[in-house]
Amino acid sequence: MKSILDHLGLTGVLSGAGAGTWLKTSGITIQSLSPINGKTIGQVRCADSSDYEQVVQKAVQAFREWRTVPAPRRGEIVRQIGQALREHKQELGALVSLEVGKILTEGQGEVQEMIDIADFAVGQARMLYGLTMHSERPGHRMYEQWHPLGPVGVISAFNFPVAVWAWNAMIALIAGDTVIWKPSSKAPLSAIAAAEIAFRVLRKNSLPDGILSLLIGGRDDIGETLLADKRLPLISATGSVAMGRRVAVKVAERLGRSLLELGGNNAVIVTAQADLGLAVRAIVFGAVGTAGQRCTTTRRVIAHKDIYPDLRTALIKAYQQITIGNPLKKGILMGPLIDRQAVENMQATLVQVQKQGGKILFGGQVLTGKGFASGTYVTPCICEVPHDLPMLREETFAPILYLISCTDLAEAISFQNDVPQGLSSAIFTRNLLESEAFLGHTGSDCGIANVNIGTSGAEIGGAFGGEKETGGGREAGSDAWRAYMRRQTNTINWSTELPLAQGIRFDIA
Ligand code: UN1
């Protein structure tokens, strides 16, 4: 950890505001605590409202210039950022693990996701395609083009402290936008390190300040101001449904656009015709990976009654083998939750689940003793619950897996869709008819629907996001770039007549 911050020249109390170069901030000083042992790993002086203003002004100013740089040239800058991330993958991945407690391979996987989206964006920079239309009028041509949108605000959560920024920022950069990033104040160091890696590339290319910027600060000082700021046409926010509701309302009040990627409540359907071995491996990674703190985490398993008992036994057996401890150590599969509050939330959920008629089959304890003094370690939990348990409708950001039995596929799909969220979903089956039913119009209502792979660990090439309370936004691959651009429809008359559309006559004598 020390090595990457030292390496990047980030030592002492770090600045929580940068725009290519770092500002001397004047907000409060916060500590970054590692959930691994509760110890301070760094200090950050947050941005206050005057720092905010300086940064946004730089982003507005830089946009005027950046939008005129040809898109493939913008892609070349993103290519260099991707390269710099490759060079720092090990250290940045380790810092992510240290700061948010995910295991080392997941920390590095997160940086790989940043590299992947950078690569994707480089190619996309030459493919910002618009359509052409045939005009109904003779001697006329119609087409649409995509213009840069403006400075974009990106709000990210603690659980993917750097990758979610990259999905947004790399695409926004090639789109010609500038980006103001407000990361989670639970993971400020990872954000500072990632930003500095990108800032170095911008500085090396003698680009002006403000193309990428970072603001670390509280909801009131920075967050709310960002949402209300008319200079930012788009706010892309990742986090809880409660946070998304505030963002949506506040941004809509000024008729800005928001792109929301909020909570999930992801289910895996296991039919009687599934490969159970495959299903168990996918469910365990989906439910226990990142200690159940991904928006794509598998929270519910809906299994056909004929295979339910076998699946339950196999899952419990697999859970008994999960190694819990310091996520930086080899062989550990599950690290701590982000903080004690998260542990308390998990415990409170389990109390409710049992009150409502659910049964704990495995785990759910808070670990104590050597190596667990921080109070942030738990055993992952499996609960057996009726399909209409009220708590099933809520996302608890913790490793709790609910098992539900069903009688047929139609029932499984209806159970799956009967929650307010709609991010990710999966079916395990070797039967084509079942998988197609799941993928059809009356199947899964989620933004992501997978067959024979789990709910988490999406590749960046697809559009990422979900329906209902998940917010409807799409980030990363496919045509998600369009959200970061301004569409313009152009009609060009190359004749010497002026025919009106719809056959309207308006002749001046
Ligand atoms: C998130 O938890 O906010 O699909 C993002 C996945 C990762 C991204 C998760 N690629 O699990």
Image (cartoon, helix red, strand yellow):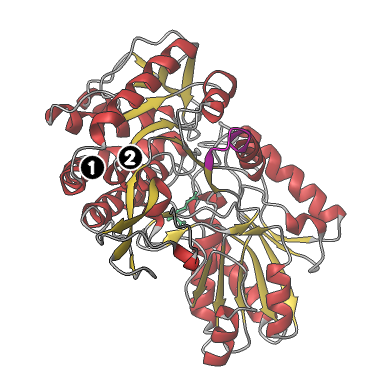
**Is label 2 or label 1 in front?**
1
Residue 378 visible, this angle: yes
Q: Residue at position x 34%, y 9% from top? A: 24
Residue sitting nearer the eye, 12 or 128: 128
Q: Which mark is residue 85?
A: 1
**Alpha-carbon distance for marks 2 and 1?**
13 Å
- Quadrant of image for the N terminus: top left
Magenta residues (range): 250-257
Task: Decide if residue 294 is on the left or right side of residue 354.
Answer: left
Task: Say what secondary structure mark 2 lies in.
Answer: helix
Crowd band around label 2 with a 10 angstrom C-alpha radius: few (<14), some (14–19), many (20+): many
Q: Which mark is residue 94?
A: 2
Residue sitting nearer the eye, 28 or 165: 165
Q: Is residue 310 above or below residue 490?
A: below
Q: Are marks 2 and 1 in contact (CB under 8 Å)?
A: no
Check if residue 252 falls in the magenta segment.
Answer: yes
Q: Which mark is residue 497?
A: none
Percent position (x, y) of residue 295? Answer: 55, 52
Residue 331 visible, this angle: no
Q: How many marks?
A: 2
Residue type highlighted by circle 1: Leu
Task: Say what secondary structure mark 1 lies in.
Answer: helix
Q: Is residue 207 above or below residue 149?
A: above
Task: Decide if residue 126 is on the left or right side of residue 297.
Answer: left
